[in-house]
Amino acid sequence: MTAYLLASLLFLVGIYSAATKRNLIKIIIGLGISGYAINLFFVLLGYRAGGRAPIFPEALAAGEMVDPLPQALVLMFIVVGLGATSLLSALAVRLYEKHGTFDVRRMRRLRG
């Protein structure tokens, strides 16, 4: 139960960072933290104490197998998250080249 609470706390820290920071790099890091908190939560959902990998036939017969679906979702999310992070980083670099700052509030004032 405490692991679920800690995963939720990590998610809230990432959302807080993304919502309150003015620096684009800190916002990207906050979104990454919240994404990996979701990954941790999925892995915790699929965990079973004393469970074995689903590739062993005796684990299938005894019903003590770990659920492989959350693990597959996490692997897919890692790839998608990496692509999104690289896209956001490239966008942040281009905005820095145009405006000369990573501060979101200064970029709003430089609109034109």
Image: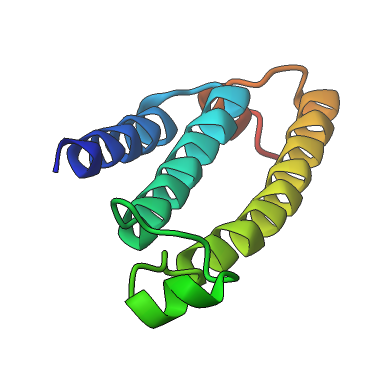
At which x and y percent is residue 1? 14, 43
At which x and y percent is residue 69? 49, 72
Q: How many labels, in total?
A: 0
Residue 14 shows up from this direction: yes
Q: Could you tell whether 2 is left or right of 57 in the image?
A: left
Query: Which is more toward the observer, 100 or 55?
Result: 55
Name the residue at 50% across, 69% down: 68
Residue 95 lies, with reference to residue 42, above or below; the image says above
Q: Quadrant of the C terminus?
A: top right
Q: Could you tell whether 109 is left or right of 18 in the image?
A: right
Query: Which is more toward the observer, 49 or 17?
Result: 49
Name the residue at 16% across, 36% down: 2
Name the residue at 34% across, 51% down: 44
Residue located farthest toward the front when viewing the structure as drawn: 58
Q: What's the coloring here?
A: rainbow
At which x and y percent is residue 46? 37, 62
Name the residue at 33% across, 76% down: 63
At which x and y percent is residue 78? 64, 52
Residue 52 found in image quarter: bottom left
Residue 109 shows up from this direction: no
Q: Could you tell whether 100 is left or right of 59 in the image?
A: right
Query: Which is more toward the observer, 77 or 102?
Result: 77
